[in-house]
Image (cartoon, rainbow, N blue to C red):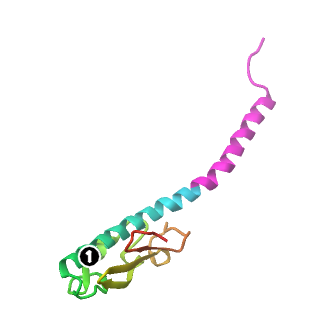
Amino acid sequence: MKKGFTLIELMVVILIVAILAAVAIPILRGRLEAAKWSEGKATMGSIATALRAYQAEKGPTGAVPTAIIGTGATQLGFLAADLDGTYFTSGCYAISGVAMDPLTFTITCTAATSTRTEKPTNPASVTLNQLGVFN
């Protein structure tokens, strides 16, 4: 007597694997976008830390930082290469709404301005405020 699988049993297994793949691929694609954005969010956290340190050093009446990159009284001191990552470049980050007393700011990371080929596409941008809330 020969042992083995029938054609129908093999087709059922292939069908089950195909269904699992059809369900898993969209879920994994969403996870890839979230993973890409985690790089941008980590860099935004570093910029927020630099803003807090700047405010602590300059005091509530100090000059308001207007740029992230470069040195000078109104810049945070990052070099352009400091903010370059796998998916985002230094041109992706911007600060706005900065006030020193009390410290308020909004950091925006925009994926469309990245020169990387595998940049995230959804969402188009993410913001971080002084409370540590991402939108």
Q: Residue furthest right?
A: 8
Q: Residues within 10 Å of mark 1 (few under 14, many from 20)?
A: few
Residue 8 pos. (x, y %) = 81, 31
Q: Is mark 1 on a helix, strand or loop?
A: loop
Please identify the quarter of the rendering in which residue 51 is found.
Answer: bottom left
Picture quadrant where residue 101 is located: bottom left
Q: Which residue in the structure is indicated by mark 1?
A: 79
Residue at image position (71%, 45%) is 19
In the displayed structure, 90 sits above or below 20; it is below
The rendered magenta stretch, by its main secondary structure, is classed as helix
- Which amino acid, mark 1? Leu
Q: Which of 111 and 14 is in front in this view?
A: 111
Indicate whether residue 106 is drawn in magenta: no
Q: Position of 45 compared to 14: left or right?
A: left
Residue found farthest to the top: 1
- What residue is rendered at 35% in x and 68% in y? 45
Q: From the viewer's perspective, is residue 70 above or below residue 89?
A: below
The foreground one among 67 and 127 is 127
Q: Give the range drawn in magenta.
A: 1-28
Q: Residue furthest left?
A: 57
Q: Is residue 62 left or right of residue 67?
A: left
**Quarter of the image where the N terminus is located:** top right
